[in-house]
Image (tube, rainbow, N blue to C red):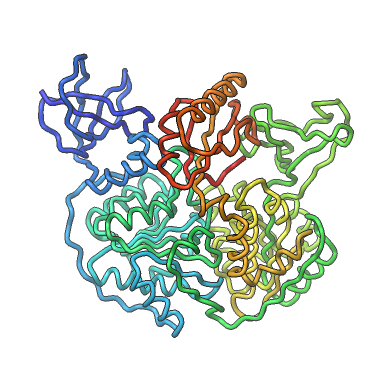
Amino acid sequence: MFYYKTALLGSPLELLIYRACEQIQIGRVIKVLLKTKECLGVVMQDAEEPPFECQSINDITTRFFTADQIRRAKFISEYYSSSLGLALGLFTPHESEKRVFEKLTLPAPKLSAQQQKAFEFVRSNERSLIFGDTGSGKSEIYIALICDTLSQGKNAVFLLPEIGLTMQLEARLRVFFGDLTAVWHSKLTKKRKSEILRAIHEGRIRVVIGARSALFLPLYDTGLIIVDEEHDESYKSNSAPRYNARDMSLAIGAKEGIKVVLGSATPSLQTALKMPYFRLKGTFFKTDKEIIYENAHNDISPKMLCEIETALASGRQIIVFLPTRAHFKYVTCKACGKNVECPFCAVSMSLHKNINALKCHYCGFTERIPKACPKCGSEIMEAVRLGTAEVMDRLRVIFNSYRIEKFDRDEITTDAKLNKILKSFQSREIDILVGTQMLSKGHDYHNVGLSVIMGIDSLLAMNDFKAREHALSLAVQIAGRSGRKESGKVFIQSKNCDFFKKYLNNYDSFLEYEKTVRKGLYPPFKKLMRLLISHKNEAKAKEITDKTVQILRENASVEIVGAGVCDISKIAGKHRCFVLLRCDNVKPLLYAAALTRNPFVQADMDPLNFS
């Protein structure tokens, strides 16, 4: 009889011991019972016969995880303080042994002199950053690098922060690589995923494009990982294991000798300080851009309408950005000043006129719009802070002969809807596209003559050490959608115009300023870990938090920056508390996470969300 320590895929449980009548290779996927439920497990190591009765392994599948995949999973488990089962659950197992890939000589795009310099710089560094202005031609460099990788008999992974970017990039890459290319993301059908995996196993797919999950596909002989828009916070997972795909790419590259290239027009301070980079300035196409500022709050003003009318009259398309979905962010009582909150989350409900209801954007709870304030009974209620739906509705009334559509997570619920609206905008069937930060994600449409930025001050005022970086980066990215060819205008509505005037066209200067603000306090100069405590019982959540703080004060050499109730104190019926830790290096933080391990405590290394 043989005994094996086994990780249950997607489970927070530690390794469990199962028995078998035959020898099984490490990494093999097996089927086992957990109580009465059949689960998939992974054989991690041999075990001695335990003093208790073990369950038998039900079945041994043909799938397996390679030594590289297991090593990556162990790193995720240790660094991001999760179980091996959860870490391995990110990966797709192999179904065939390693094969030798053909060296392919493919025609690369023609590069400008500056692009060629950037290409040579990246080629000579195992990990590097292309710090290139919006529209400077980073994509052509990426394609040239992929051609170079395929010529060595290796494969490439191209990561994007949002699936909304994949359609346009896939079209570009197919021009050069044809059917060697595949797109991978969560909204693909099960059938399509199976087809792609089969093609990867057979060596017919050599270039994978996708969101962060594409990093974990069973692609042998990866020679290049590209992380475009590396600054984007979508690369960070909001559920355990709370990994960052950008950081994981760098860790994988360093351990396995894979070239990693990051790209951004607005790189994070951490990347700009720690990575060798090539500064690619200017735009690939000749453009002329005018920035117009309005010292105003979030409102559709006469000045804004005048700019929109001018752009429409000249046959140009327009994008309108604001950070809020729905019609309005809040419904507020004018008598007592309280917002209508979700009963399960300590957040204000958003007003959706199309369904005549208030909706929570955290747990999805929906209720009818109340006729009176739930707190004081007053019937004098008002909607506050414009959302995408309200802006779209108002613009449709004013510019009723033009087609105006919405581009946010309420509207884009499937891959088909995403592709349909992007194709319509690309073919100029849509005149104005109103959306959230999905608009900023690298879309390249040459007829956009005006970018309107509303509500940016709400991002600048967030309780987050990266608030300035996030707001400016978003403004630069949105501004970059206008005037990709010919001339363009950018209309920015803000009460902080001086900040944007100073740094919008000088991101390098902002990075220097931000460096002085964060030094000695925040990343990249310090490491942060956030312990998130959640429990259905409020008193219990606070008790666990107090106990966690006590354990850390007595046993860990880390700084406790703060502890208490989260800004959003309840989500989906669970009360939330936090403990924020700071240290010069990572080891004491990992020790702190191990000390405080608890089913109700989640460790978030390198946190980006502080709400």
Camera sees residue 207 = no
Q: Give the image location of residue 301, x and y in percent.
A: 83, 61
| Most foreground residue, 580 or 248 | 580
**Residue drawn at x 63%, y 71% as measured from the top left:** 506
Mark count: 0
Side of 243 relative to 65 (left or right): right
Left or right for 208, reference 363: left
- Residue 22 position within the rendered picture, expressed as x and y whole percent measured from the top left: 10, 29
Instruction: Tell which of 137 and 60 is nearer to you.
Output: 137
Residue 203 visible in the displayed image: yes
Query: Residue at the spot x=73%, y=58% of the render?
Result: 454
Residue located at (50% from left, 58% from top): 270
How far across and how far down the image is residue 560, in percent?
55, 36
Q: Which residue of the protein is positioned furthest toward the bottom in this rendering?
A: 113
User: Image check: 438 left or right of 381?
Assistant: left
Position of the C terminus by quadrant: top right
Q: Residue 387 in the image: x percent, y percent? A: 72, 49
Q: Quadrant of the N terminus?
A: top left
| 206 in relation to 379, above or below | below
